[in-house]
Amino acid sequence: MTASSVSLRHLILGLLTQKPMSGYDIKRFLKSLSWLIGSPSFGSLYPALRSLLRDGLVVESGDPNQNKRARRIYRITEAGEGALRGWINQPVAPDASLKSFVMRLVLARCFPRAGLVAHLQQRRSQVTMHLATLEQVNRAADDKIEWGQHLALGYGVTLAAAELAWLDSTLNQLLQSLPAEVGQEERVFSES
Amino acid sequence: MTASSVSLRHLILGLLTQKPMSGYDIKRFLKSLSWLIGSPSFGSLYPALRSLLRDGLVVESGDPNQNKRARRIYRITEAGEGALRGWINQPVAPDASLKSFVMRLVLARCFPRAGLVAHLQQRRSQVTMHLATLEQVNRAADDKIEWGQHLALGYGVTLAAAELAWLDSTLNQLLQSLPAEVGQEERVFSES
DNA sequence: TCTCCCATGTAATATGTTACATGATTGT
DNA sequence: ACAATCATGTAACATATTACATGGGAGA
C-alpha cells in the first residue's frame, strides 16, 4: 500500500550480512517480526532470492546436497554488500512509515555507527512531527470526528510516545559509546 | 509486502461511513496516519474509487459542478455498507500486522460495540503472544545475534508493551460503557 | 504407513508505485 | 502574472498474494 522504500531485496541482503541463510530461514526470522512489518509470502521471497542470485548479489553457498529439493543456503557477495551500502546511504523519505523504519533497523549493523545515530535522530524528529500532527488532528475536530477516529489517533499517539522514549534511550546508549571510538570502530561496513 | 487483509477498498468504504469525501480528502486524512500505515498513492486511490463506483458500493454525490476537473464527492451506498459489514464480520488472521490492526481501528465505528471489544481482546492476546516470541528470540540467541537485530527486537518489545497498555486502558473504558446499554446501543451498524 | 513440518518453486492474478499530464483556484 | 496548492486521471512498470505442486525427513 505504501512505498516500502526498502524493498524485499534490500531486506534480504541485510539479513544475509549476518550469516548465510536459506529462504525458509529468512521467512522464519521475518515471521518473528510479522507483528510490526508483516512477513513476505514465499511467492515473493523465492523469486526475490532468484533475482539476487541472477544479479550476482548473492551466491549459493556450499551445501553439498544431491537432492533436487534441498535447502539452498545463500551468502551475500561483495557486489551485494556494495548494493546494500549504496542503498543505506541514500536518504529516507520524510514520511517514511514505521514499517520502513523497522526494516532499516534490522539492517542497523550495516550502518556505520555515526550513520545509525543520524538515522535515529532523523527518525526522532519525524516522529515528533507526526505526533504533533496526530494531536492536532485529534483536537481540531474533537466533536466532529467520530470516536472510531479518536481511537485510531489515540493509538497512534500512544505508540509515537513510546517510540520517542525508545529513541531517546537508544540514542543515549549509542552516543555514550561513540565519542570514544571515533575513527577506530567508526565504520562497521565501510571498507574491508 | 504482507497481506493487508484489509484492502484499500475496504478502508475507503469505512472512511466514507463518516461523511462523504473526495479522493483528495481521503488521501489527506490517510496522510495523517502515514506514520503508522503509510498512505496510498493517487495511482491506487483513484482507481480504487472508480472500481467502488463501478460496483455500486459508492455513488458520486451532489456537487453541482460543470467543470471536467472538479471535486468528486463520494458517498457510500447501502450495498457498500453491506460489503463493509460482511468484511468486518470475517475473522482476522492470527498474525495480523500492526498496519492491518490500525486499519480496522479506523473502521471502529462500523463495528457493533461488542464486536469491537472482541476485536480488541483478540488483538490483546495476539500482541501478548508476539511479545513473548520477541523476547524469546531476543534471549535465545543473545550473543549469537547481532546488535542490529537486538535493536529491532528491542524496538518491537517497547512498542508491544505500549500497545498492551493502550489496549488495557481502552478495553476498560469500553467495558464500563458496555454493560449498561447491552441490547439497546448494542448495534451501531447492524440494521437500519 | 500416515501425517506433519521442512523446503522450494511457479503461474495467474491483483495491487501498488512512478512518472506523467491536465486544469482550477487561491494567495502574493 | 506567477507560484503553490487543490484535484483528478492514465499508462507502464514493479511487486505482491494466492493457490497450487513437488518432494524429503521425522516421529507416531
Image (cartoon, coloured by chain):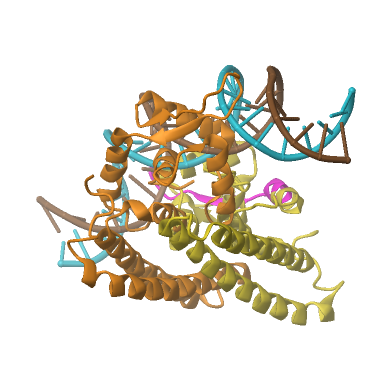
Chain colours: A orange, B yellow, C cyan, D brown
Residue extending farthest front: A64
Residue B76 in the image: state x and y as whole percent: 63, 51
Residue A122 in the image: state x and y as whole percent: 30, 64
> Is the residue B87 above or below the residue B182 in the image?
above
Q: Quadrant of the C terminus of chain B?
A: bottom right
Residue A146 appears in the picture as rendered: no
Viewer-nearest residue: A161 or B57:
A161
Q: Is residue A73 magenta?
A: no
Viewer-nearest residue: A84 or A190:
A190
> Is the residue B19 above or below the residue B12 in the image?
below
> Is the residue A79 above or below the residue B39 in the image?
above
**Total count of labels:** 0
Residue at image position (42%, 35%) is A75
Q: Is residue B77 magenta?
A: yes
Query: Which contiguous range is marked in magenta?
Result: B66-83
Residue B85 appears in the picture as rendered: yes
Viewer-nearest residue: A92 or B76:
A92
Left or right, B98 with respect to A183, comes to right
Residue A3 in the image: state x and y as whole percent: 41, 46
Residue B185 in the image: state x and y as whole percent: 80, 73
Left or right, A159 with respect to A114, comes to right
Residue at image position (73%, 67%) is B121
